[in-house]
Amino acid sequence: MRKINKYLPQAASWFFILLFIYAGVSKMLDFENFRIHIGKSPLLSAWAGFVSYAVIAVELLICGLLVYRRTQLAGLYASFTLMVAFTVYIWLILNFSDFVPCSCGCILEELGWTEHLLFNIACVVLAAAAIWITERDRLRLKGSILTYLGVLLAAAFGLLVVLFYSSEHIIKKENNFTRRFLQNPVTEVSTMTLAANRPYFAGTDGDRIFTGDLVRPLLLSSISDDLKQLKTMRILPEKLVEMTFRNVRAEISKGRYYLFDGTVPVIYSAKLDDPEAKIISRGDAYFTQLSVLDTARFALRTQSSLTHRYVLALLNLNTAAKVQLYDRLLEPQTDGVFDVDGLLQANDESVVYTYHYRNVFLVLDQNMNLRQRLNTIDTTGQAKISVTVLKDGSRRMDAPPLKVNENFSLLGRILFNQSNLRGKTEPRGTWKNHLVIDLYRTDVQHYLGSMKIKKISKGPLNGYIFTPDHLYILQANELKKFRYTEKFKILIKQGEAENPDQE
């Protein structure tokens, strides 16, 4: 025991010197990735810049204190405090975070979150033991030692909690806008559980709903509108062995289905219920999104080979120059890629593109001419994203962006937009348990109202479709059908809100 008391403080000091030198130098050598890890943290993202510098500085400062015997005790106290902070951080992540990031981004990358928590606890115990032995050798009272350790533990815990809540407030602060919720606009009618692993809506045609499966992309399912009958067809694309697809999707339009994957410049098509899909476009365009306009024309989002920015385009199979770019439609604010990211959809009335990270959506005609540049009701006009260029030239967002618009569905001249932002006076419980969908006209700047729909499960929302009479929601592998109230049916038919009910 005496040997342990003699050598443990010095051994602990050298352990922490090696640990913090390794950690600090590793972070400095790959600083951008470390900052990105901190930025992705659900607890510290708002303070990513300050924390990333501060952690490295503190680790190296502690090493300096531990090297000299005169300041060794102060270094042990600092080591104890820092390891408590690391431990509290991981504990908060595991118990109070909305999500757990895939990587810790801290000291030992090969450890998982739970293993890292246990490692940190062991370090806290080691530092406390070294302090105890050193202070007892200096005849410090037991009560005083425990008081010092308790104060430092409380300070580290308090600091992490303050950083957590202040970051939450900055990232998720309420926007100064007020929603007008419609009173019970839909009623649940029926439910169907799908066998698909990652289903998505491919579209509707008459009295059938069509879904695809991202895991088994050549399966196309048709479901009767009462959700009682399901038929699955395996698509047989011609020359399939020549393709190297990554993310195949299907879209239904006017009695036909279209199969495509923008990483391969090929589009297939066939009549509904015909499994043999034929190539209608090959080598014409690469794209990141596609929406069908008619049998020969498609609205695309692609990437300019000159500027590498996202642009909207029209693919017309009946013209000599099949692809026409419209590079002035998407307005870049930072890099022209992340900041203009969004969703593209078309119907018989218009083509609509909603930005993910700002309160704007574009309404185009079917020749891709801009009709309207309209706003959602929130106040986020500037995309709140931060992009870092890594050593290899690639770009990555180094902090979770503030996402404004998540998804949308078109019905006539109405856009049903799923919002990610909580309005003024709206309770958190509403957002935890409900989807919030805002209704807008696409021909004029006019907000029609909002609706909230109780979430089906904890699984991801895979899409929703508004038809003239029903709403269909696909969450995880549960498909639900909702019936409109008469008042809501009149609202969406007229496209204007006349004395809408409020909650």
Image: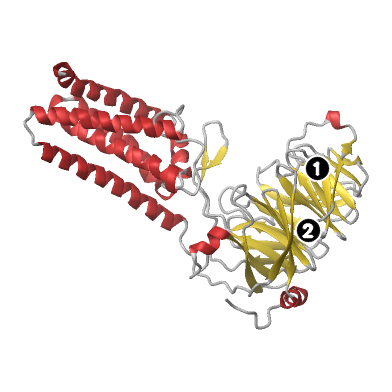
Compute the Cα span from label 2 to label 1: 16 Å
Using a 10 Å C-alpha cutoff, classify the residue at mark 2 as few (fewer than 14 neighbours), some (14 to 19) or many (20 or more). Answer: many
Query: Which image quadrant for residue 268?
Result: top right
- Does residue 291 lie above or below 196 as drawn? below
Disc 1 packing (10 Å; few <14; some 14–19; many ≥20):
many
Residue at the spot 42% in from the left edge and 30% down from the top edge: 115
Q: Label 1 amino acid?
A: Phe
Name which residue lies at 89% across and 32% down: 239
Q: Position of residue 183 (x, y in %)?
A: 63, 75
Residue 294, can we see it? yes
Front residue of 1 and 145:
1
Q: Given the image, on which type of amino acid does mark 2 rest?
A: Ala
Q: Earlier in the sequence, mark 2 or mark 1?
A: 1
Up the image or down, 151 lies above or below 243; here it is below
Residue 151 horizontal side relative to residue 31, left or right: left
Looking at the image, residue 83 sits to the left or right of residue 317; the answer is left
Determine which residue is flagged by label 1: 260
* The C terminus sits in image quarter: bottom right
Q: How is the image coloured?
A: secondary structure
Query: What secondary structure is marked by label 2?
Result: strand
Image quarter of residue 153: top left
Q: Give residue 413's position: percent from left, percent from top.
A: 76, 69
Q: Nearer the viewer, residue 242 or 135?
A: 135
* Residue drawn where x is 82% and y is 39% of the image: 218
Q: Is residue 105 visible?
A: no
Percent position of residue 436, x then y:
61, 63
Residue 317 position, x and y percent, is 89, 47
Residue that sits furthest to the top in the current view? 3
Q: Which residue is mark 2?
A: 346
